[in-house]
Amino acid sequence: MGIGEFLFLIKGLQWTLALSAIGFAGGTVMGLAVALARTSGIRLLERATAGYIAVFQGTPLLMQLFVVYYGLALTGVKLDAWAAVAIGFTLHASAYLGEIWRGSIEAVPRGQVEAAKALSLGYVARTKDVILPQALRISLPATIGFLVQLIKGTSLAAIVGFTELARAGSIVSNQIFQPLLVFGIVGALYFALCWPLSLYGSRLERQFAVAVR
């Protein structure tokens, strides 16, 4: 494999990173809204967001990308591959992160919430200053674990023709007919991205377990 093919793989890696970052950032914003709605105490909001989470957790990511790209086109909304996968991954991430953070918010000791109410803190101040900082700390290991899964899941974006790392590897492999070499390099690049994150998530989980003893 020549330098040109390797640089093409690196270009695919850049698109993988960009897609992961956009999906995670968008999912963070929407996921926080989902988590707050799930813990709002408003029955209608809780049921609506529970249904939203059930749909995205109960269907394959591959199908979700397919529906966003091809399904919207049937309604007259034509998106290019980049926009479709960015929307698909954002929606997917928001459902999973929303459920992770919902659990973390509910894991905050009830006494903390009651103490904040006793100090006459309103909902916004109570959530921003008391609940979310503790919930964020609780959720970090699971959030990082989901980010690892999201990075690996970007390989499914090839279904709509988006050229990320895995598709770039497939293109190079078809050109030089060395699949073991090419996908060995692709696997090594994924490993270099995901393994440090997995180690960091495990470390945070151990630290949190020690702190709560």
Image (spheres, grey):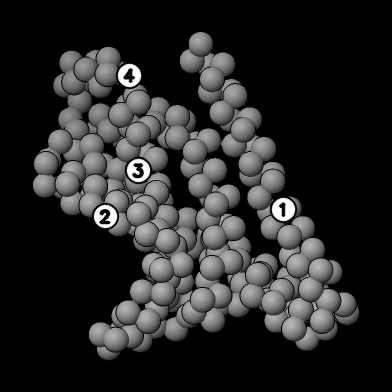
Q: Which residue is mark 2?
A: 52
Residue 122 in the figure: left or right of residue 211 = left
Counting residues from the start of the chain, the first of labels 3 and 2 encountered is 2
4 vs 1, front mark: 1
Res 191 label: 1
Q: Quadrant of the N terminus?
A: bottom right
Q: Position of residue 91 (x, y in %)?
A: 37, 61
Q: Are marks 4 and 1 in contact (CB under 8 Å)?
A: no
Q: How many marks?
A: 4
Residue 147 visible in rendering:
yes
Q: Label 3 sits on what residue type?
A: Glu
Q: Position of residue 50 (x, y in %)?
A: 24, 47
Q: Secondary structure at mark 3?
A: helix
Q: How far apart are the alpha carbons under marks 3 and 1?
A: 27 Å
Q: Residues within 10 Å of mark 3 (few under 14, many from 20)?
A: many
Q: Label 1 sits on what residue type?
A: Phe
Q: Quadrant of residue 207?
A: top right
